[in-house]
Amino acid sequence: MAKFELKLPKMGESVAEATLTSWLKEVGDRIEEDEAVLEIATDKVDSEVPSEVNGVLVEKLFEVDDVIQVGQTIAVIEIEGTTSASVTPKVKVIETPTQEVITQIEAPVTEYAKVSVQSSDKRFYSPLVKNIAAAEKISQQELDSISGTGKDGRVTKNDILQYLETRSSQPLKAEVASSAVKETIVQNKTVKTATPISVNGGDEIIEMSRMGKLIAHHMIESVQTAAHVQSFIEADVTNIWNWRKKVKDNFAKREGESLTFTPIFLEAVAKALKDYPMLNISIDGDKIIKRKNINIGMAAALADGNLIVPVIKNADQLNLVGMAKAVNDLAGRARTGKLKPDDIQGGTYTVTNVGTFGSIMGTPIINQPQVGILALGAIRKVPAVIETPEGDFIGIRYKMFLSHSYDHRVVNGALGGQFVKAVADYLEAWDSNREV
C-alpha cells in the first residue's frame, strides 16, 4: 500500500498558516478523489481541503483549532500502490460567516492584533479566534469567560460565534443603547469619551454585522491615514455606447460572454496607469513602493448589499476579450461566494462603479495601502455643444463623470488630474470601427 501525504497548500501570497476548524472524515473512512477531508480557516476565507486520490484516511496529524503552516502534512491517506508520495491539494472556498468578516477589503485583518487578546499557559486561542475577538471588541476577560468545546477546553470558531449571537440578543437599556465616541486632543494624546444616545420606545436597534464593523474600521482608518483629494472630469462616451450596441450580440455568440462597459473602462484605466506609474504605488510608512504589475481591484456588489473587491491581475496585458472574461468570472464568483484567497489580494489601484446605483458621481475612499480609486458615474444622455469645422451645434451625447480620489501625501493635484484626464481621453478616442 502507498501512502499519500495531504499537505496544506499555498492559498495566497500573504497567507502563511490556517486554523483547522473541523474534520469531515475520520480515521478508517473511505475517501473519494476531490472529496473534502477537512475544513480550515485563514484570515481571508474559510476553505475545504479535498483529497486528490481515492483511498482510506489512516492518520490525522492535527486536531481541531490547531494552527497549520503552509506545506505541513495534515493527514495521511493510504491508497493502492508501491511507493509513497505527497499531493498538493486543491482548496475550495466555501461561504461562511468568517468569509463575510474578512473578504470585504484587501487591507490585512491582522490590524486587529492591536487588541490585547493573548493565549496563556492555561488556555490557547487560535489566530482565527483572536481576529474575531478583536473585530468584535471582546476583551481578554470576556474571552476567558467563554466556555470552549475544543480540545482541552479551547474556544473554537463556533463557540465564539455562538457567544456573539447570545451577546447581541441580550436586551439593551433604553436610556443608553449605544455610545457615540468623541475624540479630543489633550497634551498631544487622543482621548475618547462616550456620549450617551437616547433610544425612544419605537426605535429599532440593529446590531452591526461583523462585516459592517470591519468595513467601518477600514474606512475610518483610510480617512485618518490618507489626505483625500478629488478631481472630477466629464467624458463623452457616445462612440463607446454606439460601438458596444453594435457588437455585443455577436460578441456574446462568439465568446459565450456578455460584453459590459466595465472591461472597456478598465482597459482605459490600465492604459492610464502605464502612462502615470506613480499612481500605481503603495505607501509603507515613509517609503513609496512602486508596483511592477498593474493589478486593478474592481468593487463588486453582493446580494446582501455589501461589497467585495476582487483583483484583475496584470490588467494591462489583457486584450478586451481577456478583460471581459476576467471581469465576468470574478463578478460571478463574487456573487456566489466562490472567490479564492488570491482573488482578493495584490491590488494596486481600485475602480468602483457608482453609476450602477444611479449616482452620477461619487467621492470614494481609498483602499489602503493604495493611493488612488476611481468612481465611474452613470452614463447619461445629455445635450452638449459639438464642435465641427463647419461650426458648433447642439447635439445629444452620452456622457459620464469620472471621480478620482487620491492621496495628497504623495499625489499632487497635477498628477491626480492628469491621470483622470488620460482615462477620459482614452474613452473619448474609442475607435467606432474597432474589431473585437
Image (cartoon, rainbow, N blue to C red):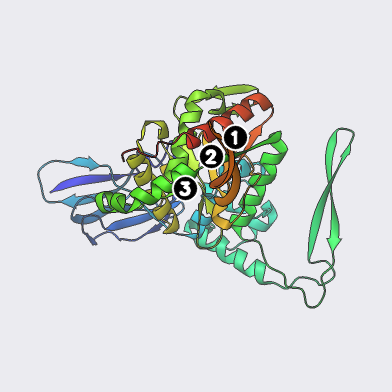
Q: Is residue 316 above or below residue 37?
A: above
Does residue 235 appear in this view? yes
Which numbered disc flags the more N-terminal residue, 2 or 3?
3
Q: Amino acid at mark 1?
A: Gly
Marks 1 and 3, Cα distance to the nearest angstrom?
Answer: 28 Å
Q: Residue at x 30, y 49 (%)?
A: 251
Marks 2 and 3, Cα distance to the nearest angstrom?
Answer: 24 Å
Q: Is residue 52 above or below residue 175?
A: above
Residue at the far left: name it.
82
Mark 1 touching mark 2, by CB under 8 A? yes
**Label 3: few (<14), some or many (≥20) within 10 Å?**
many
Mark 1 touching mark 3, by CB under 8 A? no
Residue at mark 2: 350
**Label 1: few (<14), some or many (≥20) within 10 Å?**
many
Q: Please give left or right for residue 238 compared with residue 259 in the image.
A: right
Q: Position of residue 118 (x, y in %)?
A: 62, 46
| Picture quadrant where residue 28 is located | bottom left
Residue at mark 3: 42
